[in-house]
Amino acid sequence: MLKKKMIVMVLAGILCILASPLAVYASEDDAQPPRASEYIRSTSVEIVPQGNGTLLLKNKLGATTIVDKLGIITLEIQKKVGGYWQSIDTLVTDDYDYNTGTYIYDCYYYGTPGTEYRSYVEFYVKNDGGSETKIVTSTPKVAN
């Protein structure tokens, strides 16, 4: 009888061990920071008034790693018409860099002093068969 109880207890213990989840720990070599995006690390879109209606548009795109292709699908300048932003000019379409992790595109727009403008940029990153786009608008600025 004692032998049977002992066998039952050992088998019950083995079943408990097999049914329990095992803790798994990642090594520091496998650690990666959490990302909201698989390909795009950062974007920056800024308008800097230069005087006489001239605006400097500064655009920067950072990828999470070196990628096959990154750049701008479209860069448009917009102004507010009747309370809504309306695209009035397309400054860039399909401009890309290849095999890099950073893309920078600066350009000038010659507007009208006293008019409020913003830029609308659609960024693009492609790598290893996957891709991602992100639309960013700048903070509106008045051309001086």
Image (cartoon, rainbow, N blue to C red):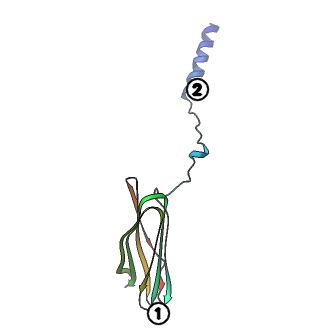
Q: Secondary structure at mark 2?
A: helix
**Identity of the residue drawn at 58% across and 21% down:** 14
Nearest to N terminus: mark 1 or mark 2? 2
Q: Tell me: residue 24, above or below residue 9.
A: below
Q: Name the quadrant containing residue 137.
A: bottom left
Residue 39 placed where, x, y %? 45, 58
Q: Secondary structure at mark 1?
A: loop
**Identity of the residue drawn at 64% across and 8% down:** 2
Residue 142 placed where, x, y %? 47, 87
Identify the residue position indicated by label 2 in the image. 17
**Identity of the residue drawn at 43% across and 77% down:** 119
Distance of label 1 from label 2 (alpha carbons): 77 Å
Identify the residue position indicated by label 1 in the image. 52
Q: Tell me: residue 103, above or below residue 9.
A: below
Residue kind at label 1, given as amino acid type: Asn
Q: Name the quadrant containing residue 107.
A: bottom left
Between marks 1 and 2 in the image, the one whose residue lies nearer the viewer = 1
- Total label count? 2
Residue 32 placed where, x, y %? 56, 51
Near-viewer residue (89 or 20): 89
Q: Quadrant of the N terminus?
A: top right
Residue kind at label 2, given as amino acid type: Ile
**Identity of the residue drawn at 55% across and 23% down:** 15
